[in-house]
Image (spheres, rainbow, N blue to C red):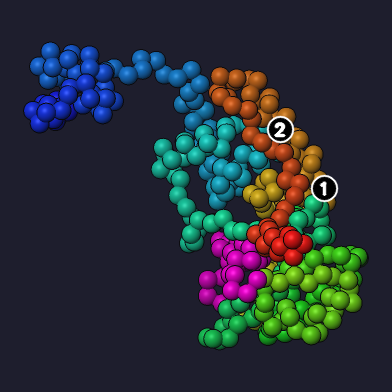
Amino acid sequence: MMILALIHEAVDQGARLYKVAAVLGLSLRTLERWTGLGGGEDLRAGPLQPPANQLSEEERARVLAVANQPEYRDLSPKQIVPLLADQGVYVASESTFFRVLREANQLHHRQPSRAPSPRPQPYLATGPLQLWSWDITYLQSAVRGRFYYLYLIEDVWSRKIMGLTVAEAESMETAAALMQQLCAEQAIDPRGIVLHSDNGSPMKGATMLATLQRLGIVASFSRPHVSDDNPFSESLFRTLKYRPEYPRSHFADPEVARLWVTGFVTWYNHEHLHSAIGFVTPADRHAGRDVALLEHRCRVYEQARQRHPERWSRTTRDYSRVEEVQLNPGRATEEARREAKRAA
């Protein structure tokens, strides 16, 4: 046996046998027994009985069948399980879904993008209509080098998309008109809302700033040379452009682009289970309906645990509500440090 050959070589080089055994994670008695057997194969049998909480073949088949249903096949187990819980159904935990799919060679990253990386997140939102984020992104047109411009405003606490427009140019006038239209159409009192953006010219233009001041909105901007200070809008654009139905070539005209984005916003606000807010939809969270949904999931989990307590080594999944959302706490820390220094 190769292990015994290596052990003999180490001993011949002057190593003590018990130290060699410790390095290999074996007992000295095991080495002596192997040697006595003439260097035979490893006779350790391992566990003789399957784990008591092991899934049956029928249960494994059900996990695969559910994961491959048309309404779930493009979703992560982290979204499948909460959706089932909303229907009062518990099939298995997220980790079990992942494990069964991995063993069936069905666990693959389906999007042409890297896995999301953590972003540093000065403001604290404890409810909707407190902190908004907005930005502009390019949409490819039929003419090479020419783009349409998508303006999106998102509520950071609920992740709900509050307003949008598609234009043929970037301008502070378009941004200002969108902000006024949003507040008027949705009967929102914007006084005190913080609106965060990067340092682009439409964001800092005189018309836009004058509109924000007249509405009572507090303008907030990213720090210079810090590329990840507007993470919520960047994440939203990433979700938009990696949807399976996103056009891979171009949009025929601004109206086509506007219709597609409107459909995306409907899906995002009312169907998409957002991972950062407990896998509920932004619209449910914005309206406060997520409280009952999360409580219902907790009850479904607890009932599942009572049916098979041997399968739960820890408490059930934490479906407590995300009450606070922060934007760029690093900047707040720096400002507090400067305040403390000035006070000293």
Residue at the farthest front position: 344
How much space separates mark 1 and mark 2, taking CA atoms? 17 Å
Q: What element carries label 2?
A: helix
Query: Is 165 within the magenta?
Result: no
Residue at mark 2? 298
Query: Is 226 within the magenta?
Result: yes
**Amino acid type of the residue tagged 1 in the rendering:** Gly
| Any part of residue 313 in sight | yes
Q: Which residue is drawn at 80% across and 66% down?
A: 194
User: Which quadrant would residue 340 be assigned to in this image?
Assistant: bottom right
Q: Residue at x 74, y 65 (%)?
A: 342
Q: Residues within 10 Å of mark 2 (few under 14, many from 20)?
A: some
Q: Position of residue 128 (x, y in %)?
A: 81, 56
Image: 271 above or below 45:
below
Report if the CB atoms under discs 1 and 2 are less than 8 Å apart.
no
**Quadrant where the N terminus is found in the figure:** top left
**Amino acid type of the residue tagged 2 in the rendering:** Cys
* 98 on left or right of 11: right
Image: 160 above or below 69:
below
Residue at mark 1? 288
Residue range of the region highlighted in magenta in the rendering: 223-250
Q: Position of residue 273 (x, y in %)?
A: 67, 50
Q: Is mark 1 on a helix, strand or loop?
A: loop
Q: Is the magenta stretch mostly helix, strand or loop?
A: loop
Front residue of this view, candidates 204 and 60: 204
